[in-house]
Amino acid sequence: MAEEEESPLRATIELCEEPTMHKVHVTYTLYNTSDKPLSVLERDSPLWPIANAFDILDAAGEEVPYNGKVRRLPPQSDDDWLDLAPRAHLAVTREISHGFELQPCCSYTVRPPNSHRVRESSSDPEGTWRAVACDPLVFTICPEEDSK
């Protein structure tokens, strides 16, 4: 059996500010750890501004239902790929709570995607799914104080 090549992708996810019921901002950073340039499919990933690419789990480990908008996508094109230079990274900040009913005084876990579609050359138009190593993010929604 052939040994599978280790994925060149790593990621981190961090809170940008104290989360509230109405707003949870995170920064998702994707790293290319290889010595080769890669292209990453932007859509269906946290890199795309309108993607719902994160799962949010409650304290019991159950997925919080997503009730937000779902968009139908046109066929992918070359414009949907982002170039990632060797040993470089891409970082995006996203508001991830839209479409989820988050409750105060509850802890949640954000589970980032465990793979991205990657192509290592333009002769591979569809790309291949590659694993992404990324630890989940745990946060607690604090009650919002009344403004006086």
Image (cartoon, helix red, strand yellow):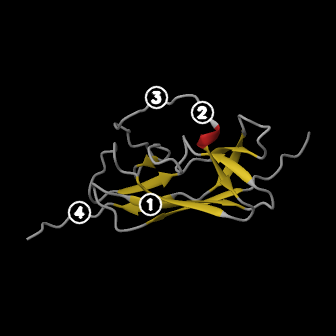
Q: Are marks 3 and 2 in contact (CB under 8 Å)?
A: no
Circle 2 SS class: loop
State the quadrant of the C terminus. bottom left
Q: Nearer the viewer, mark 3 or mark 1?
A: 3
Residue 63 picture location, percent across and down? 43, 42
Above or below, 138 relative to 42: below
Name the residue beneath numbered marker 2. 76
**Residue at 27% from the left image edge and 55% from the top image edge:** 21
Q: Dot 1: what SS? A: strand
The quarter in which the N terminus is drawn is top right
Amino acid on which disc 2 is placed: Gln
Q: Nearer the viewer, residue 100 or 39?
A: 39
Q: Which residue is mark 1?
A: 26
Camera-side mark, 3 or 4:
3
Q: Using the image as rendered, state which of residue 144 and residue 69 is in the foreground.
A: 69
**Mark closer to the observer (1, 2):** 2
Gap between marks 1 and 4 measured at Cα: 19 Å
Residue 60 image offset from top left, x and y in percent: 42, 49
- The amino acid type, in three-letter code, at marker 4 is Pro
The residue tagged 4 is 143
| Residue bearing mark 3 | 72
Q: CA distance from mark 2 to mark 4?
A: 41 Å
**Upstream in the sequence, badge 1 or badge 2?**
1
Number of numbered markers = 4
How dense is the environment of label 1, judged by Cα within 10 Å: few (below 14), some, or many (20 and up)? Answer: many
Is there a contact, CB below 8 Å, between mark 1 and mark 4? no
Dividing the picture into quarters, in which one does residue 90 lie?
bottom right
In the picture shown, does residue 148 fall above or below 23?
below
